[in-house]
Image (cartoon, coloured by chain):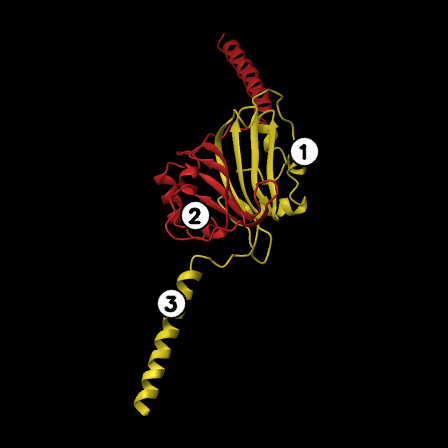
Chain colours: A yellow, B red
Amino acid sequence: MRYITGAVALGAALVLGTLATTAQAVAAPAQPARTGGLYAPSELVLTMGQGDSRATATVQRAVTLTCMPKSGGSHPNAIAACDQLRTVAGDFSAVTAAPSQRLCTKEWAPVVVTADGVWQGKRVSYTYTFANPCTMTDGRGSVFDF
Amino acid sequence: MRYITGAVALGAALVLGTLATTAQAVAAPAQPARTGGLYAPSELVLTMGQGDSRATATVQRAVTLTCMPKSGGSHPNAIAACDQLRTVAGDFSAVTAAPSQRLCTKEWAPVVVTADGVWQGKRVSYTYTFANPCTMTDGRGSVFDF
């Protein structure tokens, strides 16, 4: 009787094992959907290039900027750049339209800056053309100073 | 005669000095144009979100990826992602179109992945919609596995 109970138990274990294996085989392909993190992402690529439009300007320099959870990326001054963007709530036009703080020559040697990516979960695609490199870095802070 | 020559020389020096000062005053605002680096930049922002188009999908996750001069960024596996992109010469469609390597369910729960920025100096703006999260990570390597 002891022997029979053992055999039944073994059989049940085998059946359960097979069921478990089958369940695994079916469930495996459906990955658990990863949710977003604890915060909305802020990840950007900033570029600058000589030319007068995004389509034609050759990209000369490009950096990444991560502002959440902490400031980072290949931007040379990520902390100041993120602080500046937070101040204007990610509004890049407020960065490029800042009032001039010194004299610049007026020649036309256009420089295009672009910003693409995500700011606090919202997509960003921004383009601005400065008349020349002087006006680009003329008191406009750290965002496009790379 | 010696005295006169000296005075003339002094006068000429003063004039030259004034000219030089004037030239400096004019030239100063024109910053030396920074050139590109030693290599073409490769800086990207990758995003994923649930939805069926770039315009409507909410960004759930976003990472930066820098592939030059060395692999980095907030991508969790930047080295493998850059290696994969180098293998396909930055062609994101080759990443998303890789053949399926396991079984996925077929339900429609679309996921949009995007890539924006610069790959080896060329602008990139790529969007692809996967039918569901399983197909997104189905043997397609590290690029969109974040």
Q: Give the x, y percent position of residue B125.
A: 51, 36
| Residue farthest right in this picture | A99
- Judged from the image, the secondary structure of the residue bearing numbered disc 3 is helix
| The one of A132 and B105 positioned closer to us in this rendering | B105
The residue that disc 2 covers is B72
Give the number of marks.
3
**Mark 3 and mark 1 on one chain:** yes
Mark 3 belongs to chain = A
Does any portion of residue B67 appear in the rendered image?
no
In the rendering, at what x and y percent does residue B101 appear? 37, 50
Image coordinates for residue B48, horizontal then vertical, percent:
53, 47
In the image, taking residue B76 as reference, residue A142 lies left or right, namely right
Point 43% across, 47% down: residue: B72
Give the number of the disc on residue A21.
Answer: 3
Front tag of 2 and 3:
3
Q: Tag 1: Cα neighbours inside 10 Å, few (<14), some, or many (≥20)?
A: few
Q: Nearer the viewer, mark 2 or mark 1?
A: 2
Using residue A20 as the reference point, say whether residue A137 is left or right of it.
right
Q: Amino acid at mark 3?
A: Thr
Q: Which residue is mark 1?
A: A97
The disc numbered 2 marks a residue on which chain? B
**Is residue B93 or residue B60 the one in the foreground?**
B93
Mark 3–mark 1 CB contact (< 8 Å): no
Around disc 3, counting alpha carbons within 10 Å, would you say few (fewer than 14), some (14 to 19), or many (20 or more)? few
What amino acid is at disc 1?
Ala
Residue at the (35%, 87%) spot, across then down: A5
- Mark pair 3, 1: CA separation: 63 Å
**What residue lies at 51% left-to-right and 51% top-to-bottom?**
B107
Horizontal and vertical percent for residue A41? 57, 50
